[in-house]
Image (cartoon, helix red, strand yellow):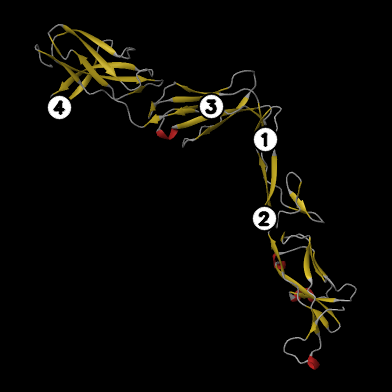
Amino acid sequence: MQGQVEELQPGRRPWENPERVIRIKPTVTLQPSWTQIYSGETVTVRCEIQGGEGAQWTYEWRPDKLNTPPTSNEYRIITATESDSGGYSCRGRRDYLVTEWSDTITLTVSYKPKVRLGADRTAVPVGGSVTLTCSVSPSSSSSSSGWKYYFCRGGRGEPVYYTEDSESVRIDTTVSNRPVVTLYPNWSEIYRGETITVRCEIHGGDTEWDYEWETNSIIKPPNQTEYRIRSASSSNSGNYRCKGRMKSSQHNTTEWSDSVTLTVSDNKPRPVLTVSPSWLSPGASVTLNCEVEHPSAGWSFYWYKAVPDLSEKSSSYELLPDGSGTAQDSYIIHGQTHTAGYVCRAGRGDPEYHTDHSPPKFVWSAGLSLM
């Protein structure tokens, strides 16, 4: 105790001062030294007096609840709760001598932490490797110390305090087969109301597969080998890809296929009819041509004569001879003798989808009238 400076407590005369403050400042420490702990953990708050070794000290604590029952130099919190959060400080007392109050150390007790399991890849080729990462949240420096990982939950301290188990991460083994997505029919654009099939094909071997689809379209396909869209709309537009999962071993999958883009237009196409010549001599031949968008996409053509109905101020369409579902987009009329109007339309698919009729085109003749 030699060499320490004693001072009177403020506001008291020497003969009224029953105790003296000595210039020793204790230190509060935590064991373990985590200022962030979790509900249920065990922590010891300890008061250490440097320079006062050998003296018989008693200890005072702030907050006051630590002083009952009679205090020692440490306070063990067996099962921490949020009510244990707060600042802790101490001082030592010996006879009429007291130390200064220590600096305050703040302890924070929060809810049980979560643990997260991550993987750098979830689809691994046969013989490949995957790295699993386990992290405790929150992960500040004051709360991340001391964790050991048990794949997959974290634990620390003595006795060991455990987090909850993490959510699982599924790791699939990918086999060499790679699926191919195909469209049937294989048209670059289809129209509202048409029927089309998106198919996932896996070649090689006799393995039985379950199928999984991924798409950014609004309507999600069922997990089957093919997805038949009976009346398409723009909601079906998007990119489609698939993979297979072995029925015999659900952790064995193929890689994802390349994506195929399906475009569905809500506009119904309308063909354009041209006639040549548009003026002719009686008995000459006339060639009709029907143009439709995407001409190579499986269209068949239908050819009609426009028959005017003068009472209704409209026309009806009369199918021309052999003019039903021709493969060619042209039609020849032999021996035209009078002025007449014609229209065409196109159809494709099964069940067959039809365009609107084209606007009528007329072949003018110096001979007889439209009737």
Closer mark to the observer between disc 1 and disc 2: 2
- Spatial separation of the CA atoms under disc 4 and disc 1: 71 Å
Q: Which mark is residue 140?
A: 2
- Where is residue 336 shown, x and y percent of the image? 16, 9
> Residue tagged by mark 4?
313
Q: Residues within 10 Å of mark 1 (few under 14, many from 20)?
A: some
Residue 129 occupies which quadrant of the picture?
top right
User: What's the residue type where badge 3 is placed?
Assistant: Asp
Circles 3 and 2: CB atoms closer than 8 Å: no
What amino acid is labelled 1 in the image? Ile
- To which residue does mark 1 refer? 171
Q: Position of residue 152 (x, y in %)?
A: 73, 45
Query: Which circle marks residue 258 in the picture?
Result: 3
Question: Relative to residue 315, is residue 297 drawn left or right?
Answer: right
Pair 4/3: label in front: 3
Under mark 2, the amino acid is: Ser
Residue type, label 4: Lys
Q: Left or right? Give the position of 156 relative to 237.
A: right
Say which label, 3 or 1, has the lower sequence index.
1
Residue 326, position as x, y percentages in the image: 32, 12
Q: CA distance from mark 3 to mark 2?
A: 42 Å
